[in-house]
Image (cartoon, rainbow, N blue to C red):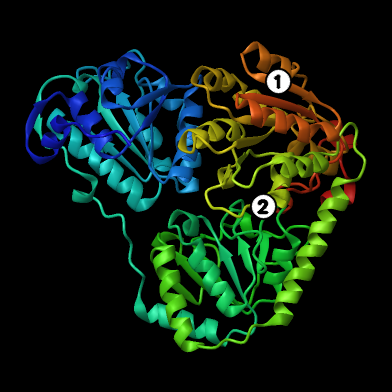
Amino acid sequence: MVKQTEEMKQAVNQKQKMTPSEAIVETLVAENIKEVYGIVGSAFMDMLDLFPAAGIRFIPVRHEQSAGHMADAYERVSGTAGVIVGQNGPGITNMVTSVAAANQAHSPLVVISPSAGTNAIGMDGFQEANQVSIFKDITKETVQVTNKNRVADKLRTAFRIAYAERGPVLFDIPRDLFYGEVEDVILEPHQYRADKRGVGDPASIDRAVELLKNAKNPAIISGRGSVDANGVDSVVKIAEHLTAPGATAYMHNDAFPADHPLAVGPIGYMGSKAAMYSLQETDVVLAVGTRLSQFGTLPCYDIDYFPKHAKIIQIDINPRQIGRTHPVEVGIIGDAKAVSDEIYRQLQSALPSPAKDNARIQAVTKRKEEWDQELVDLAMADGNPINPRRALLEMTKAMPENAIVSSDIGNVSSTANAYLTFNQTRRHIAALTFGNTGFAYPAALGAQLAEPEAPVFAIVGDGAWGMSLHEVSTAVEQNIPVVACVFNNKAWAAEKKNQVDYYDDRYIGSNIDAPEFAEVAKSMGALGYTIDKPEDIVPAIEDVLKKRKPAVLNIYVDGTQLAPPFRKDALKMPTRLLDKYKHLDYGEWGQ
């Protein structure tokens, strides 16, 4: 942590003359911001010039979208809000995708958004865009600076809302308002925002405890809220007290320790059958820190597992998420850890000597063993050149216990949901339900900056890699030793699977012809490995971890071994009505 100088401490306690740029930077220092991500631009150069003296590291990316993904992952690992900045107009609009992704991921993020100067707003000048309107629907709030004397106050508001509502906030400031003179006080965060949340409504907790106490087959779904609140241990205590299987929400595989006897793995697309069968038979679901997303609870493997008649107890910090996708019996608005601790405390009184349900533990163990064996059997089927599941299996063998793994969106990245297990929190950084490709690698860079000593891996398909390989230059320049595992099947494979199943193997736009990614990586100064045999994966990872340099593993996998379609619920067999297209018709299948 950067030590505050005496000058900084004085600024906290009394008004001082400063420039708006200095007010912004001092507020960032007070918020413990160590890195800011973006691409240099004239609009914020006066602020940028202060960063080195303030102890803030500017990480120059190659594309502003990457800045948002880096900041998103940095927050997920560190718990400190990410900060990004770019040139007004195109620099800021390049961040739209990653800010939208952070919004759906509930990641606190502040977007410092320089805009056109006050004397040029509305004149369609150079690099002008109505950034506030563009970001309004993908942020928790858009905060506008209209007077230089309010710069620090408005930035504090941005941080307050980002933390309170768990998501990105746009801090929009006309570029000329970085200059001038103001007289202001730099406040400490505890003076303008509260970090602790309550335990929820006592009557609702009483009702939840009563339901859990009388449940015959309770089950738990633990989500990111449990991780963010450092409450996973509290959730585990409830599971042990009730002998309840503990599942994790979609793509939050670090929200319940995988090595626990009651752990059943993740739900959602390409999740764990052990989790799904456990939920099928439950009568009470305790959902902690999860919005129970619509996509994350859809049937998978033809198992319609999410219980229709079970009573759901949902705990979420955001009242908007309670009962949003599934009807609940009890909704509790509160901090995941605080509420879990209170439920556990009351359960100890309500069930002072719960009988350990050995039959349920045995059932959980049997399901997990069967599922684990199925995953191995599927992985060991021959592939040309490598079965993608085998590549995932080998990769997980080589990853250390404290590894952080980011995963992209796509066929292999999603299949990884079944193979990734974690016993520590803040280890799984996934693209989640916004579903944008190109997430995993910049996210891995941000995760590595948040935890420099941890080994960090990115699982990326070759399609997504084409959107993010430029950031290898950033990794080399900044010495960020992330290991990119590129699963190369020469296709946009998730979409190709749709063309296999629904369009009679007509591949339009789904095949990819790309350069040798390992050689490209080497040309950028990184380590590069070309892998076409499964037995070469573990040695390559071991070698990379010893060298601790940015690395790209170009792993050639079989493009015919594909996971089921992402959205069976959203696809239909095609029907053609015009004569010229009838040869493309599936006939009665399309009805």
Image x and y of residue 273, in percent? 75, 62
For the N terminus, give its image quadrant.
Answer: top left
Residue 82, above or below 572: above
On residue 528, the disc is: 1
Q: Position of residue 201 (x, y in %)?
A: 35, 75
Tell which circle, 1 or 2, labels the residue nearer the N-terminal end.
2
Q: Say which element carries label 2.
A: loop
Q: Compared with residue 588, is residue 306 higher up or lower down, i.e. above or below?
A: below
Number of the label disc, if any, that sits on residue 421? 2
From where the camera sits, is residue 538 visible?
Answer: yes
**Is disc 1 placed on a helix, strand or loop?**
strand
**Near-viewer residue (79 or 527):** 527
> Mark on residue 580?
none
10 Å neighbourhood of mark 2: few (<14), some, or many (≥20)? many
Task: Where is residue 358? Give x, y as percent.
Answer: 71, 81
Is residue 558 visible in this depiction of the protein?
no
Q: Residue at x 30, y 27 (%)?
A: 55
Q: What crowding class fits label 1: few (fewer than 14 Cα within 10 Å), some (14-19), or many (20 or more)?
A: many
Residue 363 is left or right of residue 80, and the answer is right
Q: Position of residue 561 (x, y in %)?
A: 85, 40
